Image: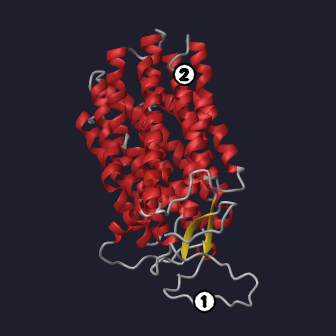
Amino acid sequence: MYVTGAFVSNIGTWIQRVAQDWLVLQLSGGSAMAVGVTTALQFLPALLLSPWGGLLADRVDKRKLLILTQSWMAISALGLGALTVAGVAQTWHVYLFALIFGIGAALDAPARQAFVSEVAGREHLTNAIGLNSSSFNAARLIGPGIAGLIMASAGVGWAILTNAISYFAFLVALSMLNRSELSRSEPVARAKGQLREGFSYVAQRADLLIALGVAFAVGTFGMNFQMTNALMVRGEFHLGAEAYGLLGSIMGIGSLLGALIAARRGKVPSLRFVVGAATVVGVIITASGLAPNYLWYAISLPITGLVVLLTLTATNMYIQTSVDPQVRGRVMALYMTVLMGGTPIGAPLLGWLAEIFGPRASLIGGGLLQLFVIGLVVLLVRRRSVATARVPEIDEETEVVDVEPADPAPADPDPADPDPVGVSSSESSPAAPPRVILPTPPSRQPVPTR
């Protein structure tokens, strides 16, 4: 029920994305700047409000919060669609509703990410995350085509209203879920400093710092495909809108394949896989910028979509399965912030590179910048790791285990005991939480870390 409702809602979201951009172009006389402003207003709340959305997700019932945020976005789509159908919509109306929609999305995303674990349970979480990605990317293939049909037959306003209606499928699914079968985490009681506590939790976990750094690099410099595809098609290959639209569908095929592969994953990916996959993304993006013609560029896109999807799904899986349920909402909010919040930084920078050096520079420069940021994050975090002697190597598998806090004054081992060696407490803190992430290299015993 959950996946079906989300699938219908995701189709509506992609319909509105296409229709909203087309509406702005119509109202502004074809201004690309107006489209950019609309995009910035829609993503700005994610940068500012996602941490608060994560705190809300930890404090309250996630299902009820999702009902509220989905209703908020449905009403915003209904308002813009009604103004457009009535023929009174203006450019500033689109700006306003993009901002309102973005506020709802910023509060919705952390709760939706964390709620997947409550629906599927921890034992099925890796598959559930992959299925969730499959739903989103299948909608990405279907939604734009439906949007084109609706806009051609009924108009832009009715396409936006279609999105408003699509939210009811998800709302019905949330209402019909059997709450007794949800693997619900205990809500966190209201207290001072809880937002800071989420940041502190991440700051003490070097593996999370690396995973979030990878997400930032990919989101900021590697996920600007709508812009880079348009620049390459128009400025480098000198083709039209049909060729541009075809590239989106071709890339969506690779993304969907990646989501289906991720849905079959039975084990949580290692941090080494996350970093390695992101590195491959940077290399492929750089290589695609060197494609000699449209055909070779089109061939590179499904591979890019496949690897990007595998990277993001692996990062999502790693973070969700390695954090304490009590802070999962806040940590996933940080993940969404670094993944989406870098778009206003990366897109203008790559656009500037394309203006100065040509369209290929947006891909070559983006790929190289992504590789540089990934390398810099790993280097800085590992140097910090050496200084604090707490951080797992990125090529070590991580394992969630339960340990007792270290005794401040452990008793001497029994000399008669032939194997008195236990878990070393030399690097433990008496205040360490009961659930921790331990590196498990084959050459030594695991050491408790916070």
Q: Which of 399 and 236 is in front in this view?
A: 399
State the image coordinates of residue 105 (x, y, percent, origin top left).
40, 52
Q: Nearer the viewer, residue 263 or 171?
A: 263
Visible in this render: residue 319?
yes
Place residue 159 in its image quadrant.
top left
The residue positioned farthest toward the top in the image shown: 238
Inspect the image, locate mark 2, and give the three-letter code of the amino acid beneath it: Ser
435 w.r.t. 386: above or below: below
Question: Which circle, 1 or 2, is nearer the viewer?
Answer: 1
The residue to which callout 2 is attached is 288
At x 56%, y 54%, the residue is 393
State the image coordinates of residue 227 (x, y, percent, origin top left).
42, 26
328 w.r.t. 243: above or below: below
State the image coordinates of residue 116 (x, y, percent, origin top left).
57, 61
Place residue 435 in its image quadrant.
bottom right
339 w.r.t. 360: above or below: below
SS for dot 2: helix
The residue positioned farthest toward the front in the image shown: 415
At x 31%, y 50%, the residue is 100
Label at residue 3 = none
The residue to which callout 1 is attached is 412
Q: Quadrant of the N terminus?
A: bottom right
SS for dot 1: loop
